[in-house]
Image (cartoon, rainbow, N blue to C red):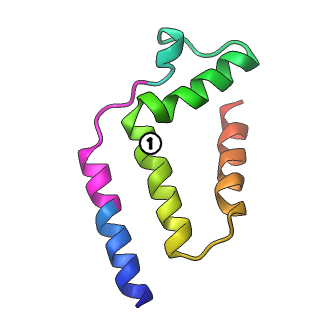
């Protein structure tokens, strides 16, 4: 049962990756890197709403957490790691 869910999630993930276009990062800032905390928050909130590639990533992360029966702490740890790398 778990193996079939993993296979299904893998196929969905592969389809999302194959259909994703190019990323348009920091679109809310006119292509500039956010310079203030508020700019960063607005850019972060705007990415999944306007950028389908970012929304696809969030959906894939949710599927991975659900299929793997992981703790909800896992996505937050990932976000913290990404925020740290971005500094």
Residue at (69%, 12%) from the top-left corner?
A: 35
Residue 86: where, in percent of width, then height?
66, 33
Residue at (56%, 67%) from the top-left corner?
A: 65
Judge from the rendering whether residue 34 lies leftward or rightward of residue 32; answer left or right.
Answer: right
* Stretch of the chain drawn in magenta: 13-24
Label 1 secondary element? helix
Q: Is residue 33 above or below residue 48?
A: above
Q: Which residue is mark 1?
A: 55
Q: Nearer the viewer, residue 57 or 33?
A: 57
Q: Is residue 47 above or below residue 77?
A: above
Residue 34: where, in percent of width, then height?
63, 16
Residue 12: where, in percent of width, then height?
31, 63
Residue at (38%, 30%) from the top-left corner?
A: 23
The question of residue 15 being in magenta is answered with yes
Judge from the rendering whether residue 20 lies leftward or rightward of residue 65; answer left or right.
Answer: left
Quadrant where the N terminus is found in the figure? bottom left
Residue 9: where, in percent of width, then height?
37, 69
Q: Residue furthest bottom?
A: 1
The question of residue 17 being in magenta is answered with yes
């Amino acid at each position: 049962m778990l193996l079939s869910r993993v296979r299904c999630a893998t196929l969905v993930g592969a389809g999302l990756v194959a259909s994703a276009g190019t990323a348009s990062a920091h679109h809310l800032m006119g292509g500039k890197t956010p310079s203030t905390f508020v700019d960063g928050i607005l850019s972060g909130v705007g990415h999944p709403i306007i950028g389908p590639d970012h929304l696809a990533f969030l959906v894939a992360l949710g599927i991975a957490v659900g299929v793997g029966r992981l703790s909800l702490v896992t996505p937050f740890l990932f976000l913290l790691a990404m925020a740290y790398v971005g500094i």
